[in-house]
Image (spheres, coloured by chain):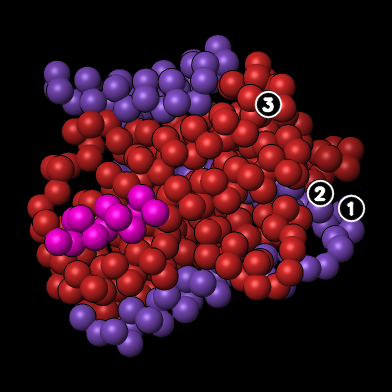
Protein backbone atom coordinates (compact mmCIF):
# COMPACT_ATOMS: atom_id res chain seq x y z
CA UNK A 1 0.00 0.00 0.00
CA UNK A 2 1.30 3.39 -1.02
CA UNK A 3 2.59 5.72 1.71
CA UNK A 4 1.97 8.66 -0.63
CA UNK A 5 -1.79 8.07 -0.78
CA UNK A 6 -1.89 7.39 2.96
CA UNK A 7 -0.13 10.66 3.78
CA UNK A 8 -2.37 12.53 1.32
CA UNK A 9 -5.37 11.15 3.22
CA UNK A 10 -3.82 12.30 6.52
CA UNK A 11 -3.39 15.80 5.05
CA UNK A 12 -6.91 15.93 3.58
CA UNK A 13 -8.47 14.68 6.81
CA UNK A 14 -6.60 17.25 8.88
CA UNK A 15 -7.38 20.10 6.47
CA UNK A 16 -11.11 19.35 6.76
CA UNK A 17 -10.97 19.26 10.56
CA UNK A 18 -8.91 22.46 10.73
CA UNK A 19 -11.21 24.73 8.69
CA UNK A 20 -13.31 25.72 11.71
CA UNK A 21 -10.80 25.87 14.60
CA UNK A 22 -7.94 27.39 12.60
CA UNK A 23 -9.78 29.86 10.33
CA UNK A 24 -12.85 30.76 12.42
CA UNK A 25 -11.65 30.00 15.97
CA UNK A 26 -9.47 33.09 16.22
CA UNK A 27 -11.99 35.76 15.31
CA UNK A 28 -15.04 37.24 16.95
CA UNK A 29 -18.20 35.82 15.43
CA UNK A 30 -21.38 37.85 15.07
CA UNK A 31 -24.62 36.66 16.74
CA UNK A 32 -26.13 35.62 13.40
CA UNK A 33 -23.10 33.49 12.51
CA UNK A 34 -23.08 31.93 15.96
CA UNK A 35 -26.76 31.13 15.68
CA UNK A 36 -26.06 29.17 12.49
CA UNK A 37 -22.94 27.48 13.91
CA UNK A 38 -24.86 26.46 17.04
CA UNK A 39 -27.25 24.53 14.81
CA UNK A 40 -24.73 22.92 12.43
CA UNK A 41 -23.99 19.81 14.50
CA UNK A 42 -27.65 19.08 15.33
CA UNK A 43 -28.92 17.79 11.94
CA UNK A 44 -25.59 16.05 11.28
CA UNK A 45 -25.76 14.09 14.55
CA UNK A 46 -29.47 13.34 14.06
CA UNK A 47 -28.66 11.98 10.60
CA UNK A 48 -25.69 10.04 11.95
CA UNK A 49 -27.84 8.36 14.62
CA UNK A 50 -30.38 7.12 12.07
CA UNK A 51 -27.86 6.22 9.36
CA UNK A 52 -25.79 4.22 11.86
CA UNK A 53 -28.97 2.46 12.99
CA UNK A 54 -30.66 1.76 9.66
CA UNK A 55 -27.93 1.68 7.00
CA UNK A 56 -27.67 -1.78 5.48
CA UNK A 57 -25.30 -0.84 2.66
CA UNK A 58 -27.29 1.27 0.18
CA UNK A 59 -30.60 0.20 1.65
CA UNK A 60 -32.40 0.76 4.90
CA UNK A 61 -32.73 -2.28 7.15
CA UNK A 62 -34.39 -2.77 10.53
CA UNK A 63 -32.26 -5.18 12.57
CA UNK A 64 -31.19 -5.48 16.22
CA UNK A 65 -29.84 -1.91 16.14
CA UNK A 66 -33.36 -0.45 15.89
CA UNK A 67 -34.82 -1.93 19.12
CA UNK A 68 -31.52 -1.01 20.79
CA UNK A 69 -32.04 2.62 19.75
CA UNK A 70 -35.65 2.45 20.98
CA UNK A 71 -34.44 1.26 24.40
CA UNK A 72 -31.89 4.08 24.40
CA UNK A 73 -34.59 6.63 23.51
CA UNK A 74 -36.80 5.38 26.36
CA UNK A 75 -33.92 5.64 28.84
CA UNK A 76 -32.94 9.11 27.60
CA UNK A 77 -36.55 10.17 28.07
CA UNK A 78 -36.49 8.72 31.60
CA UNK A 79 -33.29 10.72 32.20
CA UNK A 80 -31.08 7.70 32.80
CA UNK A 81 -27.33 8.37 33.11
CA UNK A 82 -25.36 8.40 29.86
CA UNK A 83 -23.45 5.17 30.44
CA UNK A 84 -26.64 3.33 31.39
CA UNK A 85 -28.22 4.40 28.09
CA UNK A 86 -25.20 3.26 26.08
CA UNK A 87 -24.75 -0.08 27.85
CA UNK A 88 -28.48 -0.87 27.70
CA UNK A 89 -28.45 -0.29 23.94
CA UNK A 90 -25.46 -2.62 23.51
CA UNK A 91 -27.05 -5.28 25.73
CA UNK A 92 -30.33 -5.11 23.78
CA UNK A 93 -28.59 -5.59 20.43
CA UNK A 94 -26.32 -8.33 21.78
CA UNK A 95 -29.24 -10.25 23.33
CA UNK A 96 -31.40 -10.00 20.21
CA UNK A 97 -28.53 -11.28 18.07
CA UNK A 98 -27.76 -14.08 20.52
CA UNK A 99 -31.33 -15.43 20.37
CA UNK A 100 -31.69 -14.88 16.60
CA UNK B 1 -30.19 12.69 30.59
CA UNK B 2 -28.00 13.04 33.62
CA UNK B 3 -27.10 16.66 32.83
CA UNK B 4 -30.59 17.71 33.83
CA UNK B 5 -30.32 16.09 37.24
CA UNK B 6 -26.67 16.64 38.11
CA UNK B 7 -26.48 20.36 37.63
CA UNK B 8 -24.13 21.12 40.50
CA UNK B 9 -20.75 22.30 39.29
CA UNK B 10 -18.75 19.89 41.40
CA UNK B 11 -20.41 16.83 39.86
CA UNK B 12 -20.19 17.95 36.26
CA UNK B 13 -16.43 17.52 35.61
CA UNK B 14 -16.48 13.96 37.00
CA UNK B 15 -19.48 13.09 34.87
CA UNK B 16 -17.77 14.46 31.76
CA UNK B 17 -14.60 12.44 32.41
CA UNK B 18 -16.58 9.28 33.17
CA UNK B 19 -18.64 9.60 29.98
CA UNK B 20 -15.51 10.43 27.94
CA UNK B 21 -13.72 7.32 29.21
CA UNK B 22 -16.80 5.20 28.44
CA UNK B 23 -16.88 6.45 24.86
CA UNK B 24 -13.13 5.89 24.55
CA UNK B 25 -13.39 2.26 25.66
CA UNK B 26 -16.14 1.50 23.13
CA UNK B 27 -14.09 3.16 20.39
CA UNK B 28 -11.04 1.15 21.49
CA UNK B 29 -12.79 -2.15 20.80
CA UNK B 30 -13.66 -0.93 17.30
CA UNK B 31 -10.05 0.11 16.83
CA UNK B 32 -8.90 -3.47 17.38
CA UNK B 33 -11.10 -4.61 14.52
CA UNK B 34 -9.83 -1.70 12.43
CA UNK B 35 -6.23 -2.81 13.02
CA UNK B 36 -7.10 -6.37 12.03
CA UNK B 37 -8.94 -5.30 8.87
CA UNK B 38 -6.22 -2.83 7.87
CA UNK B 39 -3.46 -5.43 7.98
CA UNK B 40 -5.66 -7.97 6.21
CA UNK B 41 -6.29 -5.37 3.47
CA UNK B 42 -2.57 -4.98 2.82
CA UNK B 43 -1.45 -2.13 5.08
CA UNK B 44 1.65 -2.68 7.18
CA UNK B 45 1.17 -2.42 10.95
CA UNK B 46 3.09 0.88 10.80
CA UNK B 47 0.75 2.24 8.13
CA UNK B 48 -2.32 1.22 10.16
CA UNK B 49 -0.93 3.02 13.22
CA UNK B 50 0.08 6.17 11.30
CA UNK B 51 -3.39 6.24 9.80
CA UNK B 52 -5.09 6.03 13.19
CA UNK B 53 -2.83 8.72 14.64
CA UNK B 54 -3.06 11.18 11.76
CA UNK B 55 -6.31 10.50 9.90
CA UNK B 56 -8.10 9.77 13.19
CA UNK B 57 -11.63 9.56 11.91
CA UNK B 58 -13.09 6.08 12.16
CA UNK B 59 -15.65 6.00 9.36
CA UNK B 60 -13.07 7.20 6.81
CA UNK B 61 -10.49 4.70 7.92
CA UNK B 62 -12.91 1.76 7.75
CA UNK B 63 -14.03 2.90 4.29
CA UNK B 64 -10.43 3.19 3.10
CA UNK B 65 -9.38 -0.32 4.13
CA UNK B 66 -12.77 -1.65 2.98
CA UNK B 67 -12.11 -0.52 -0.61
CA UNK B 68 -8.57 -1.99 -0.48
CA UNK B 69 -9.91 -5.28 0.88
CA UNK B 70 -12.45 -5.34 -1.94
CA UNK B 71 -9.62 -5.23 -4.46
CA UNK B 72 -9.64 -1.48 -5.16
CA UNK B 73 -6.42 0.50 -5.38
CA UNK B 74 -5.25 3.11 -2.91
CA UNK B 75 -6.46 5.93 -5.16
CA UNK B 76 -9.92 4.36 -5.43
CA UNK B 77 -10.01 4.16 -1.63
CA UNK B 78 -9.03 7.82 -1.24
CA UNK B 79 -12.29 9.34 -2.55
CA UNK B 80 -14.78 7.59 -0.26
CA UNK B 81 -12.50 8.17 2.73
CA UNK B 82 -12.37 11.92 2.06
CA UNK B 83 -16.16 12.12 1.54
CA UNK B 84 -16.67 10.46 4.93
CA UNK B 85 -14.18 12.87 6.53
CA UNK B 86 -15.96 15.92 5.10
CA UNK B 87 -18.49 16.14 7.92
CA UNK B 88 -15.59 16.97 10.25
CA UNK B 89 -15.34 20.32 8.45
CA UNK B 90 -18.90 21.13 9.52
CA UNK B 91 -18.17 19.88 13.05
CA UNK B 92 -15.09 22.09 13.18
CA UNK B 93 -17.15 25.13 12.24
CA UNK B 94 -19.76 24.32 14.90
CA UNK B 95 -16.95 24.02 17.48
CA UNK B 96 -15.16 27.22 16.43
CA UNK B 97 -16.92 29.36 19.07
CA UNK B 98 -15.77 26.90 21.75
CA UNK B 99 -12.21 26.24 20.54
CA UNK B 100 -10.62 29.59 21.22
CA UNK B 101 -7.03 30.18 22.20
CA UNK B 102 -3.86 30.78 20.24
CA UNK B 103 -3.25 29.30 16.81
CA UNK B 104 -0.97 26.39 17.87
CA UNK B 105 -3.55 25.27 20.43
CA UNK B 106 -6.39 25.53 17.90
CA UNK B 107 -4.31 23.69 15.30
CA UNK B 108 -3.76 20.85 17.76
CA UNK B 109 -7.40 20.81 18.86
CA UNK B 110 -8.45 20.49 15.20
CA UNK B 111 -7.06 16.96 15.05
CA UNK B 112 -9.59 15.94 17.72
CA UNK B 113 -12.62 17.20 15.75
CA UNK B 114 -14.72 14.04 15.19
CA UNK B 115 -18.28 12.75 15.81
CA UNK B 116 -17.67 11.88 19.47
CA UNK B 117 -15.96 15.10 20.54
CA UNK B 118 -18.54 17.25 18.74
CA UNK B 119 -21.46 15.40 20.31
CA UNK B 120 -19.96 15.60 23.81
CA UNK B 121 -18.98 19.27 23.51
CA UNK B 122 -22.29 20.43 22.03
CA UNK B 123 -24.22 18.57 24.76
CA UNK B 124 -22.83 20.89 27.47
CA UNK B 125 -24.59 24.06 28.57
CA UNK B 126 -21.59 26.27 29.19
CA UNK B 127 -18.53 27.01 27.02
CA UNK B 128 -16.13 25.96 29.80
CA UNK B 129 -17.86 22.60 30.20
CA UNK B 130 -18.00 22.21 26.41
CA UNK B 131 -14.24 22.75 26.16
CA UNK B 132 -13.62 20.27 28.97
CA UNK B 133 -15.89 17.70 27.30
CA UNK B 134 -14.18 18.24 23.94
CA UNK B 135 -10.66 17.68 25.28
CA UNK B 136 -11.58 14.86 27.68
CA UNK B 137 -13.37 12.97 24.91
CA UNK B 138 -10.72 13.80 22.31
CA UNK B 139 -7.82 12.54 24.42
CA UNK B 140 -9.73 9.47 25.63
CA UNK B 141 -10.82 8.48 22.12
CA UNK B 142 -7.42 9.26 20.56
CA UNK B 143 -5.53 7.12 23.07
CA UNK B 144 -8.00 4.21 22.88
CA UNK B 145 -8.29 4.36 19.08
CA UNK B 146 -4.51 4.19 18.66
CA UNK B 147 -3.90 1.52 21.31
CA UNK B 148 -6.69 -0.58 19.81
CA UNK B 149 -5.29 -0.16 16.30
CA UNK B 150 -1.84 -1.23 17.47
CA UNK B 151 -3.22 -4.31 19.22
CA UNK B 152 -5.34 -5.30 16.21
CA UNK B 153 -2.52 -4.70 13.72
CA UNK B 154 -0.05 -6.78 15.73
CA UNK B 155 -2.41 -9.61 16.70
CA UNK B 156 -3.94 -9.90 13.25
CA UNK B 157 -7.05 -11.34 14.84
CA UNK B 158 -9.29 -9.43 17.15
CA UNK B 159 -11.93 -9.99 19.75
CA UNK B 160 -14.23 -11.28 17.07
CA UNK B 161 -16.98 -9.16 15.58
CA UNK B 162 -17.79 -6.17 17.83
CA UNK B 163 -21.40 -6.52 16.69
CA UNK B 164 -21.80 -9.74 18.72
CA UNK B 165 -21.38 -7.54 21.81
CA UNK B 166 -23.86 -5.01 20.42
CA UNK B 167 -21.12 -2.40 20.20
CA UNK B 168 -22.42 -1.06 16.89
CA UNK B 169 -25.64 -0.11 18.71
CA UNK B 170 -23.68 1.83 21.34
CA UNK B 171 -22.73 4.71 19.09
CA UNK B 172 -26.20 5.79 17.92
CA UNK B 173 -27.39 5.43 21.54
CA UNK B 174 -24.53 7.62 22.78
CA UNK B 175 -25.16 10.25 20.12
CA UNK B 176 -28.88 10.23 20.92
CA UNK B 177 -28.23 10.76 24.64
CA UNK B 178 -25.93 13.68 23.79
CA UNK B 179 -28.20 15.20 21.16
CA UNK B 180 -31.46 14.96 23.16
CA UNK B 181 -31.00 18.15 25.23
CA UNK B 182 -30.49 20.11 21.98
CA UNK B 183 -33.75 18.92 20.46
CA UNK B 184 -35.71 21.93 21.63
CA UNK B 185 -36.71 24.64 19.18
CA UNK B 186 -34.92 25.44 16.87
CA UNK B 187 -32.94 22.21 17.05
CA UNK B 188 -36.00 19.98 16.52
CA UNK B 189 -36.83 21.01 12.92
CA UNK B 190 -33.13 21.04 12.03
CA UNK B 191 -32.72 17.48 13.35
CA UNK B 192 -35.94 16.19 11.77
CA UNK B 193 -35.28 17.62 8.30
CA UNK B 194 -31.63 16.55 8.44
CA UNK B 195 -32.54 13.00 9.42
CA UNK B 196 -35.21 12.68 6.70
CA UNK B 197 -32.81 13.95 4.02
CA UNK B 198 -30.08 11.56 5.12
CA UNK B 199 -32.34 8.49 5.24
CA UNK B 200 -33.82 9.34 1.84
CA UNK B 201 -30.30 9.46 0.36
CA UNK B 202 -28.95 6.24 1.90
CA UNK B 203 -30.12 3.97 -0.97
CA UNK B 204 -28.68 6.21 -3.70
CA UNK B 205 -25.78 8.30 -2.47
CA UNK B 206 -22.20 7.18 -1.77
CA UNK B 207 -21.38 6.49 1.90
CA UNK B 208 -20.82 9.71 3.80
CA UNK B 209 -22.94 11.90 1.52
CA UNK B 210 -26.27 11.36 3.37
CA UNK B 211 -24.90 12.69 6.65
CA UNK B 212 -23.32 15.76 5.00
CA UNK B 213 -26.54 16.46 3.08
CA UNK B 214 -28.32 16.64 6.43
CA UNK B 215 -26.63 20.04 6.83
CA UNK B 216 -29.61 21.40 4.86
CA UNK B 217 -31.54 20.94 8.12
CA UNK B 218 -29.77 24.05 9.40
CA UNK B 219 -31.98 26.21 7.14
CA UNK B 220 -35.36 25.40 8.79
CA UNK B 221 -33.61 25.59 12.16
CA UNK B 222 -32.40 29.12 11.48
CA UNK B 223 -35.81 30.15 10.12
CA UNK B 224 -37.50 28.91 13.31
CA UNK B 225 -34.86 30.60 15.46
CA UNK B 226 -35.53 33.90 13.69
CA UNK B 227 -39.27 33.52 14.09
CA UNK B 228 -40.07 33.12 10.42
CA UNK B 229 -42.72 30.59 9.47
CA UNK B 230 -41.04 28.26 6.99
Q: Please, what secondary structure does the residue beneath circle 3 have?
A: loop
| Circle 3 crowding by C-alpha within 10 Å: few under 14, some 14–19, many from 20 | few
- On the image, numbered disc 3 is attached to which residue? B10
Label 1 marks a residue whose chain is A
Q: Are marks 2 and 3 in contact (CB under 8 Å)?
A: no
Q: Please, what secondary structure does the residue beneath circle 2 have?
A: helix
Q: Quadrant of residue A1?
A: bottom left
Q: Are marks 3 and 1 in contact (CB under 8 Å)?
A: no
Q: Residue at x 35, y 75 (%)?
A: B78
Q: Are marks 2 and 1 in contact (CB under 8 Å)?
A: yes
- On the image, numbered disc 1 is attached to which residue? A31
| For residue B29, side relative to residue B18 (left or right) | left
Q: Please, what secondary structure does the residue beneath circle 1 have?
A: helix
Can you tell which of label 3 and label 1 is closer to the viewer?
3
Q: Which residues are magenta?
A: B143-154
Label 2 marks a residue whose chain is A
Q: Nearest the camera: B119 or B143?
A: B143
Can you tell which of label 2 and label 3 is closer to the viewer?
3
Q: Residue furthest top?
A: A78
Question: Is A100 drawn above or below residue B49 in the view shown?
Answer: above
Amino acid sequence: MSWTVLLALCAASYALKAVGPVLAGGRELGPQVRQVLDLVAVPLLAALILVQTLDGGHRLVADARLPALAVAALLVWRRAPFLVVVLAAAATAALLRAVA
Amino acid sequence: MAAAVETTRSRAPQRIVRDAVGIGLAVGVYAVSFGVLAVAAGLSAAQACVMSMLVFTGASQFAFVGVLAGGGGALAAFGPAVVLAARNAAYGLSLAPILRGRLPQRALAAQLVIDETTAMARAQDEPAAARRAFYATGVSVWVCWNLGTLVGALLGSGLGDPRTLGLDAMFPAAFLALLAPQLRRPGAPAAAIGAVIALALVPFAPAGVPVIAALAGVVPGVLVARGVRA
